[in-house]
């Protein structure tokens, strides 16, 4: 542009070509600046920080003071009652693997005693479950699928290279045309009337065009192309013409579909969905870990119950042998043999049931580990080697609750879905606006040449050009469709907010319930241990009274049954206490730290 003394602006035709090149260059340079790093959004980073915290925290971190060991707790418990100086009966899982003397019970041998024992720690079981569990393998495919959806959305800003080619031929006959009148500066021609006819001719055309289309993150698009055209005629008046051009166009919405945030909304929603799927997969893994831990302690309880029933059976057998000896010596009535045999039969039934329950517990644990090979199931006996944690915790309930509300995977997934809902609402709000767009086109043309080699020589000199600029407006009369979509998204978000509130209440309830069960089961362990001590003393006293002829075998067997039930209660209380600790860790979102597993 130049400004003369009269302040008039003179625009050279060549500058029409410079302008679109400048616009094109600026759009290409600034487009990456508009790109949002949505994958590194604050919500995703916040979730990752919480998940990393989950993997480090353990229940010990929430203890108000050092946990109290069982022996110390028993001493405190005993100090409130009369001291009993009797060694408690011990539950020995290993003993249950020994052969059972069934000489007085039709020589029935335990099927478990014939199998090889495989010792497993709880860490081994967790590792095998995470590696082999089919539910986890199925869930691990979901993040891969969601990853492809993110890539698909990100690819909508890919540049498009296009090419177009068309060849045509027309061999037309002579066609009589209309009568026309000439208007000319030549007086001799002005006013002459002639008849124009199309002569027979052979016309051939070749049209080529190649270029690139660049979608912009602002919602518009830029197209740069170069068309080439060749037209030739064969006949009385032959011709061969070449024309070319450099074309530039840009289209940019100004209201609807305008802006980086609107056009990247689908990418952000896909990324939120991917994060939600990853959290779902993580939650599936956490649930499997919790289920595996519970199955492990169920197996521990099954072994303990088998050991208790085994001891009961052995004591009943010993009593039967003793009664037979006393009857032979005339110290007891013969009816005592029948009573002792009934006691052996009852405990034989309980032993069979305990053995079956052990098989079921082993099968359940193998199911979680995907270790159901028939030969292993039939020949291998799983024996838990990890000892239960018999420590009494006093938890800081307020800290547990606060961290749980920040670390539960379900709540994190809900927050991510709420963020996706908010992004969708912003997008739909933009869609209710009118469509108002700006279009600009510019073409640098060549003059007509008779050879291809000279065709592009005059394209860039700006001698010939065409350009246009336009505005487009479009809006539905009622716009009800887009308004309905927006209202639907708002109501869905309101529904999700209500669901999150319900989830928060559920988490609070689960935490308080789990903590109460921890306290309850610890008290059960203490009470059961004392009951075992007292029942053992009572059994020994009744047995002594029987030997002195003051009790019947029925009364002795009743005290033996009470002893067995007390031992079974202790085993059950210990297993339930481990399950309560697992439920507490799960409810507070610290299960990974409790299990010492790292998902990073």
Image (cartoon, rainbow, N blue to C red):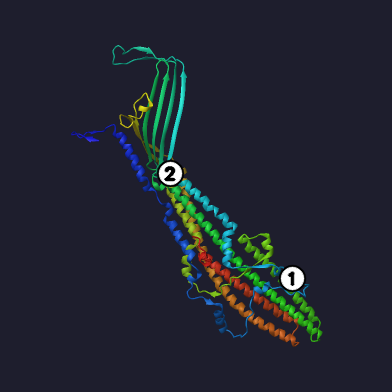
Q: Which residue is drawn at 34% across and 28% down?
A: 446
Location of mark 2 (residue): 157
Going from N to C along the chain, the mark reached first, 2 or 1, is: 1
Q: Residue at x 74, y 70 (%)?
A: 109
Where residue 405 sits in the image (x, y, percent)? 47, 63
Residue 573 visible in this rendered orientation of the protein: yes
Location of mark 1 (residue): 109
Locate residue 8 relative to residue 254 in the image: left or right.
left
Q: In which image quadrant can residue 453 be found? A: top left
Q: Residue at x 59, y 57 (%)?
A: 135
Q: Residue 386 carries which label?
A: none
Front residue of 104 and 234 = 234
Q: In this view, does 551 lie above or below 276?
A: below
Q: In which image quadrant can residue 538 be found? A: bottom right
Front residue of 320 and 518 = 320
Q: Which residue is drawn at 41% across and 24% down?
A: 231
Front residue of 572 and 281 = 281
Q: What element carries label 2?
A: helix
Where residue 127 sits in the image (x, y, percent)? 56, 63
Q: In this view, does 553 lie above or below 371?
A: below
């Amino acid at each position: 542009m130049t400004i003369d003394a009269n302040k008039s602006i003179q625009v050279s035709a060549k500058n029409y070509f410079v302008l679109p090149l400048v616009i094109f260059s600026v759009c290409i340079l600034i487009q990456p600046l508009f790109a949002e790093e949505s994958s590194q959004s604050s919500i995703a980073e916040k979730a990752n920080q919480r998940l990393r915290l989950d993997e480090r925290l353990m229940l010990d971190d929430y203890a108000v003071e050092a946990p109290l060991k069982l022996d110390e707790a028993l001493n405190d418990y005993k100090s409130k009652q009369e001291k009993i100086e009797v060694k408690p009966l011990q539950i020995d899982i290993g003993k249950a693997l020994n052969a059972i003397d069934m000489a007085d019970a039709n020589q029935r041998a335990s099927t478990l005693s014939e199998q090889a024992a495989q010792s497993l720690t709880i860490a081994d079981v967790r590792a095998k479950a995470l590696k082999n569990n089919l539910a986890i393998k199925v869930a691990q495919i979901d993040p891969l699928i969601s990853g492809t959806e993110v890539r698909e959305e990100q690819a909508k800003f890919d540049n498009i290279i296009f090419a177009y080619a068309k060849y045509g031929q027309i061999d037309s006959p002579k066609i009589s045309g209309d009568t026309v009148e000439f208007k000319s500066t030549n007086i001799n021609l002005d006013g002459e009337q002639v008849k124009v006819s199309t002569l027979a001719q052979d016309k051939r055309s070749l049209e080529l065009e190649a270029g690139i289309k660049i979608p912009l993150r602002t919602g518009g698009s830029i197209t740069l192309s170069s068309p080439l055209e060749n037209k030739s005629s064969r006949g009385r008046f032959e011709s061969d013409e070449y024309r070319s051009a450099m074309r530039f166009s840009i289209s940019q919405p100004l209201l609807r579909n305008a802006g980086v945030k609107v056009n990247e909304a689908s990418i952000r929603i896909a990324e939120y969905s991917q994060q939600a799927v990853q959290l779902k997969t993580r939650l599936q893994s956490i649930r499997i870990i919790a289920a595996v831990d519970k199955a492990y302690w169920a197996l521990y309880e099954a072994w303990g119950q088998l050991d208790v029933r085994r001891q009961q059976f052995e004591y009943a057998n010993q009593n039967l042998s003793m009664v037979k000896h006393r009857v032979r010596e005339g110290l007891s009535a013969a009816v005592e043999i029948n009573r002792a045999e009934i006691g052996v039969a009852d405990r034989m039934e309980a032993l069979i049931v305990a053995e079956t329950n052990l098989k079921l517990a082993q099968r359940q644990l193998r199911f979680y580990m995907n270790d159901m090979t028939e030969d292993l199931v039939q020949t291998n006996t799983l024996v838990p080697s990890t000892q239960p944690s018999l420590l009494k915790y006093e938890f800081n309930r307020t800290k547990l609750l606060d961290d749980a509300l920040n670390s539960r995977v379900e709540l994190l997934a809900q927050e991510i879905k709420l963020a996706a809902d908010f992004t969708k609402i912003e997008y739909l709000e933009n869609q209710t606006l009118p469509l108002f767009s700006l279009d600009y086109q510019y073409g640098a043309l060549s003059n007509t040449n008779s050879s291809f080699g000279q065709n592009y020589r005059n394209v860039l000199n700006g001698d010939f050009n065409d350009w246009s600029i336009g505005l487009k407006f479009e809006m539905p009369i009622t716009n009800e469709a887009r308004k309905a979509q927006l209202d639907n998204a708002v109501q869905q978000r309101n529904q999700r907010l209500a669901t999150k509130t319900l989830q928060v209440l559920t988490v609070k309830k689960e935490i308080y319930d789990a903590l109460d069960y921890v306290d309850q089961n610890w008290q059960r362990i203490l009470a059961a241990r004392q009951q075992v001590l007292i029942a053992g003393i009572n059994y020994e006293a009744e047995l002594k009274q029987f030997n002195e002829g003051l009790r019947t075998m029925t009364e002795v067997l009743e005290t033996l049954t009470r002893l067995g039930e007390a031992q079974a209660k202790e085993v059950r209380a210990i297993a339930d206490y481990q399950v309560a600790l697992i439920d507490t860790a799960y409810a507070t979102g610290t299960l990974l730290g409790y299990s010492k597993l790292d998902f990073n």
